[in-house]
Image: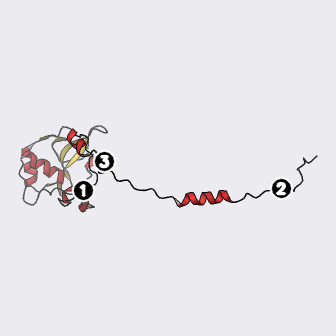
Amino acid sequence: MLAIRMQRTGRSGHASFRVVVQDSRQSPTSGKFVALLGSYDPHTRATTLVKEKTTFYLEHGAQPSERVARLLKQEGIKLPEWAAVATKKTGKIRNPDKLRRNRPADAEPKVAAPETTTSEEEVAEHEVTSEEVVETPVEAAPEAEQTTEAVEEEPTSQTEESPPETEAQS
């Protein structure tokens, strides 16, 4: 069976591709192909194809790869019904409930931005008047009482009953 696929050419790091018709049992890197249909440069996205040859091989049963089928569709070459273009693949979303688009509308952000501007009217509203000030009596802390009791105890006197230390002579 014949396959229409891309064959990589170009130096390392700067790929370009040939669009070739090849026996499906051959490796794309073998270099052996039936017909050269065109080229594709992924860096500039430039595609050159010989439309007559391409339609001939498609009519005679050559199977295009997924990427070549997309290129042929972009170039306006009609694909047979059996050579349908694959749909675009989408990745699975791991935690969809964490996405912003899936959050409820009434949810507020966790961090609110502080207001940086204050007008004179707002400052006047927040001024404290003497009527608003409420004095609270300060109660004696129980820690202070405990410290005074410790001071009142009589210190114990230590007598030096042990003999003075002498240096050992060697």
Check contact, mark 3 vs mark 1: CB within 8 A.
no
Q: Which residue ends up furthest to the front in the rendered image? A: 131
- Looking at the rendered structure, the secondary structure element under dot 1 is loop
What is the spatial separation of the Cα atoms under label 3 and label 2, in whole angstroms? 62 Å
| Number of the label disc, if any, that sits on residue 25 | 1
Residue 73 horizontal side relative to residue 101, left or right: left
Tell me which corner region of the image, top left, top right, bottom left or bottom right, holds residue 146.
bottom right
Q: Amino acid at mark 3?
A: Ser
* Vertical position of residue 159 compared to residue 49: above or below: below
Residue 8 appears in the picture as rendered: yes
Residue drawn where x is 66% and y is 56% of the image? 151
Q: Residue at x 20, y 41 (%)?
A: 121
Amino acid carrying mark 2 in the image: Thr
CA neighbours of label 3 inside 10 A, class few (<14), some (14 to 19), many (20+): few
The residue wearing badge 3 is: 130
Image point 9% across, 49% down: which residue?
A: 73
Q: Nearer the viewer, residue 21 or 18?
A: 18
Mark 1 neighbour density, 10 Å: few (under 14) some (14–19) many (20 or more): few
Q: Is residue 55 above or below residue 93?
A: above
Q: Residue furthest right?
A: 170
Q: Which residue is mark 2?
A: 159
Residue 157 against residue 48 in the figure, above or below? below
Q: CA distance from mark 2 to mark 1?
A: 106 Å
Q: Earlier in the sequence, mark 3 or mark 1?
A: 1
Tell me which numbered mark, 3 or 2, is placed earlier along the sequence. 3
Q: SS class of the residue under badge 3?
A: loop
- Image quarter of the N terminus: bottom left
- Decide if residue 65 is in sight here: no
Checking the image for residue 114, the label placed there is none
